[in-house]
Image (tube, rainbow, N blue to C red):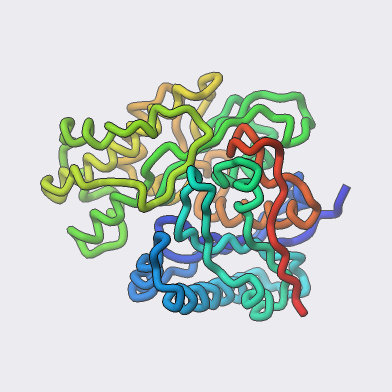
């Protein structure tokens, strides 16, 4: 059994609001300690540049410029986290650098994350693991979601079945079934998939109507009414009923039916859209969960949390109720996966991504 090491995880999600950085101690099987975490927000100017390279048709020269700037922001996040933790690069075994997904088309066997691992390793003086998804896709998987392996490790002592719902730009759920005490992570019953929109459409709506990156406190949505006809149109997509494994890319989400609504009614309808697709997802579970734990930015929206509590049959709470840090969870997951990559352990499972077998992966960029 490997010794536990300190690792840093970095995540820039589909919400494109900034870099999350988190420090954990792990052997790639258990999480033995959790250190500090932070978020380094993107400037509005960089956020626009980053969004401009989404898709598969961006100018390679522009992509290269954005990738370098993205990497440098991640390096600054690492330096700030080390300072906050009172540690140096020598204390850290590896950095898990997910990068920014700019194109994800699993039906075509394509996923692309930008971020220069070698540049980051030079900048922070720590070995870096990148490219967490492509090996899974080469084995026939969706390449997503990847956080479920971390959810398995964290939930070992919690009552199961359990559902962990991550509401980022896109929402995804991990259903975890009961297992024998001490069972290997690969032997625990699990199912995970993208449920549909998380915050992405609502964030875009808030930006358009409020000039704000998010609907803070759900105030806009709370002032509106759900348009049932528009909600029905939004839900008229075969994805939501399709059996998992399955995953979505941010540009594949379509919110145009709300365009004719008022600012408040549009926000309320988009919140209902996210909640409804989560509700549909529960039909795919082998057993009803004893509770739902919600992570990601969406848990800060009281209107969305209220909608989830109304639509789901089991108790709903934020992951903080289990002692987890919902703002750091995804970044922590990539620290965990980076250590697993160092040891050649699986990063994904067939029941999660649809790959033919458990798949390790990751590309290691060593400090020279």
What is the x, y in percent for residue 124?
A: 66, 77
Q: Residue at 36% x, 53% y: name it.
A: 251
Q: Residue at 56% x, 51% y: name it.
A: 329
Q: Residue furthest right?
A: 1
**Residue 143 vs residue 5, the one in the foreground:** 143
Q: Residue at 77% x, 70% y: name it.
A: 91
What is the x, y in percent for residue 365?
A: 71, 69
**Horizontal side of residue 12 vs 364, given as left or right:** left
- Residue 10 seen: yes
**Horizontal side of residue 54 vs 88, given as left or right:** left
Q: Residue furthest top?
A: 287
What is the x, y in percent for residue 150?
A: 64, 45
Q: Residue furthest front?
A: 108
**Residue 68 vs residue 59, the one in the foreground:** 59
**Horizontal side of residue 66 vs 78, given as left or right:** left
**Residue 314 vs residue 258, the one in the foreground:** 258
Question: On screen, 107 above or below 125?
Answer: above
Question: On screen, 162 above or below 39?
Answer: above
Q: Residue at 39% x, 48% y: name it.
A: 300
What is the x, y in percent for residue 18?
A: 45, 65
- Location of the C terminus (image quadrant): bottom right
């Amino acid at each position: 059994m490997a010794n536990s090491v300190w690792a840093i995880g970095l995540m820039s999600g589909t919400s494109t609001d900034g870099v999350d950085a988190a420090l954990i101690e792990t052997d790639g099987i258990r999480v033995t300690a959790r250190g500090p975490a932070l978020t380094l927000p993107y400037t509005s100017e960089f956020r626009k540049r980053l969004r401009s390279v989404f898709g598969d048709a961006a100018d390679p020269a522009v992509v290269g410029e954005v990738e370098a700037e993205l990497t440098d922001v991640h390096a600054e996040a690492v330096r700030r986290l080390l300072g906050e933790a009172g540690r140096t690069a020598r204390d850290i075994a590896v950095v898990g650098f997910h990068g920014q997904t700019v194109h994800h088309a699993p039906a075509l066997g394509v996923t692309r994350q930008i971020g220069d691992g070698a540049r980051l390793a030079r900048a922070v003086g720590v070995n870096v693991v990148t490219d967490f998804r492509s090996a899974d896709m080469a084995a026939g998987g969706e390449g997503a979601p990847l956080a479920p392996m971390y959810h398995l490790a964290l939930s070992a002592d919690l009552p199961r079945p359990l559902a962990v719902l991550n509401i980022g730009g896109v929402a995804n759920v991990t259903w975890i079934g009961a297992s024998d005490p001490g069972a290997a992570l690969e032997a625990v019953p699990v199912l995970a998939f993208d449920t549909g929109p998380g915050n992405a459409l609502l964030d875009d709506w808030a930006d358009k109507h409020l000039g704000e990156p998010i609907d803070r406190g759900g105030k806009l949505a709370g002032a509106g009414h759900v348009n049932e006809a528009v909600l029905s149109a939004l839900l008229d997509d075969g994805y939501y009923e399709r059996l998992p494994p399955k995953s979505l890319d941010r540009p594949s989400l379509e919110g145009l039916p709300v365009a004719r609504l008022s600012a408040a009614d549009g926000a309320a309808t988009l919140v209902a859209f996210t909640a409804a697709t989560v509700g549909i997802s529960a039909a795919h579970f082998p057993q009803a969960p004893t509770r739902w734990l919600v992570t990601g930015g969406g848990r800060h929206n009281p209107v969305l949390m209220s909608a989830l509590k109304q639509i789901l049959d089991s108790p709903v709470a934020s992951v903080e109720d289990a002692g987890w840090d919902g703002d750091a969870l995804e970044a922590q997951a990539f620290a965990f996966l980076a250590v697993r990559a160092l040891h050649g352990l699986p990063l994904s499972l067939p029941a999660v991504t649809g790959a033919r077998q458990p798949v390790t992966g990751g590309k290691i960029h060593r400090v020279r």
